[in-house]
Amino acid sequence: MFFYFNLKPTALTFVILGNLFFPNLVLAKMIKVSPAPSVFDKNNSVRFPVVPKTDPNFFFNNTVEQILSRMSVDEKIGQLLLIGFPQEKMDSKLANHIMQNKAGSFLIFKRNITSLEQLKNLNSSLVAHSFQHLRVPPLMAIDQEGGNVNRIVTNPKLPFLFHFGDLADTKFSYHYGYYTGQLLGSLGFNLNLAPVLDLADLDSNRFIALRSFGSDPIRTSQNGFAYSQGLISQKVIPTAKHFPGLGSATLDPHDTVIFNSSTLTEMDRTDLTPFKDFAKLGPHSAIMMSHMIYKGMDNSGQPASFSKYLMDDLLRKKIGFRGVIVTDDLHMKASSASITPSEAALRSLKAGSDLVMLSWSFLEQGKTFDRIKNAILRKELSIEEVNEKVRRILILKKFVYAKPSETDDRPSKTERILQEARTVSSVQVTAPELNSFSKRASLDSTSVYHLLKSVVDAKMKSIFFRPQLEQKKQLCLISDQKRLFNLIGKKDTNVFKGYHYPKHSVAKSLSHFLKSSQCDLFIITVETVAQARILNGVDEITHKKMVVINHVIPTILQNRSRYFSVLDLYGLNIQTDDILADKISEFTNMILRGQFHSASIDK
């Protein structure tokens, strides 16, 4: 027998049918809540409540604590993720992935960049999507160290950090950070994964060598701090790396597991010094952990990125760092050799990190979100710990997206970004240098050119105008650069002599010349790897005053201590012959006039 019920789909209908077919069903106790706006049709049928629009000013009108208190667990988990992706523009797959995992920070690689205009559109889309759907804007991160680690290409190329370590005056490092921050901010970035504060000697074959300010802890501290201040002045967060120091590594942690056996006492005198000074910047900063295993400091046998002692006890409590601790990429071999990226992320968060980096795999990023959520439900990771991490991240975001003071009528950086996000199709690049080249993937920059020129000039002053050279009366230049000789011009032969590289039996001829010459100071230019290797094999250099003008990779030139000085120009993509010729001319003229004055820049 069949019954036909002609009932209207009202709330009462559902209660009657529920009791009829499910007699054991117990109605849940209703909690009184504020009524949500509902829509009723003419027949008084109930529809789903209208979903309120996201408050566009939620982030700006609430404090960090208020934002934190109104975030769901899923939203908090998303704030702990710094993710990379393969797309060059926001598409449905990326948008769905972000929504599903509530991702709170994004890392841009060269694979995501086809032009400056496209990059700006991508970043604007990511920011707009986060504001609209997650209420909290993202950290927009990029690796823009300089040298070989440049995601955004400039012409001339941004220099290696080691050039600034040659100089005692930190104003050059500040200007470098200031310009880099200006460039990144104009493209929508607010987190730079730089500077490298690892200590590395150019005389060694270290993995990190050219990316570092050098091997002197004090000078690295001073230059790293100044560079970071330059970034912060442009509302870009600096990220010091790789704590507690990766300078001793000869192998790349991207490819293998690496170890360091130095004790805490040894590290405290050297590698930790730059990080201790960096921590004085306060909460608007970040430190990236190394994936190296520090057997002499931590007996857990874990990489630093999983070490509670190194992150919590040493970095947080002893050094007093108040900023965000971020992991290096958890897809690296040094991290993923024995555990999955998702398990590595949880282990790192439990040990003390705040932001875990997963640079490419959507699958692993999703697994990581699920693993963290599962850990919170199982009390493996407490919600109090999560709140502390999210709080530090929100403090960074409040800083970089801060509106100007009420007395400042200029639009804030955030307002500009949002305006661009709302009109992505007609983005106007704000930085003047970007306007003419927005459809290109590289940027012609007069700012970089002037910075490089001033650095080269200062480095040459530090070489030639030193008290030890005051009594030198005979200067000899050895080079195969005819242009350099022409630029210097004719000099008093009693003071200046120029010699071209021998064409045959170079090593033998060079050795003979150094033995027989009466020059007080030799200046020799090294333009090729072959010339550097020939110079490495010449023994007669040890007792000579020799300045090497080196244009090749610094690590190829060995036994640097036997030279009076080495001026490294590798990677400085400007014409240096003119500056060198001017300095040699100035130097010889001072000798002729007897008016030698040493430079104030020490080395």
Image (cartoon, helix red, strand yellow):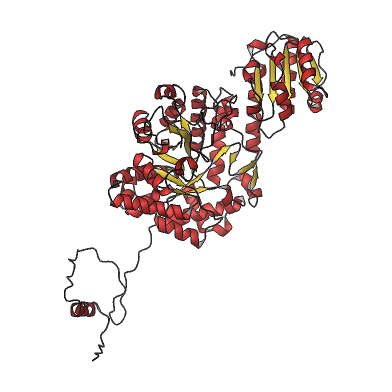
Image quadrant in which the C terminus is located:
top right
- Residue 297 on image: x %, y %: 39, 28
Residue 40 as seen in the image, left or right of residue 133: left
- Residue 305 on image: x %, y %: 42, 38
Q: Above or below — where is 57 with respect to 381?
A: below
Image-quadrant location for residue 165: top right
Q: Above or below — where is 574 with respect to 560?
A: below
Image-quadrant location for residue 493: top right
Residue 175 as seen in the image, left or right of residue 548: left
Asked if residue 235 shows in the view, the reply is no
Residue 534 as seen in the image, left or right of residue 223: right
Compare residues 436 and 603 and report the one nearer the observer: 603
Image quadrant in which the N terminus is located:
bottom left
Compare residues 331 and 178 and report the one nearer the observer: 331
At x 60%, y 28%, the residue is 163
Asked if residue 310 shows in the view, the reply is yes
- Residue 329 on image: x %, y %: 48, 43
Compare residues 430 and 146 and report the one nearer the observer: 146
Q: Residue furthest front?
A: 338
- Residue 321 on image: x %, y %: 38, 33
Residue 387 as seen in the image, left or right of residue 518: left
For the image shown, how many numbered marks are present on the structure? Answer: 0
Image-quadrant location for residue 347: top left
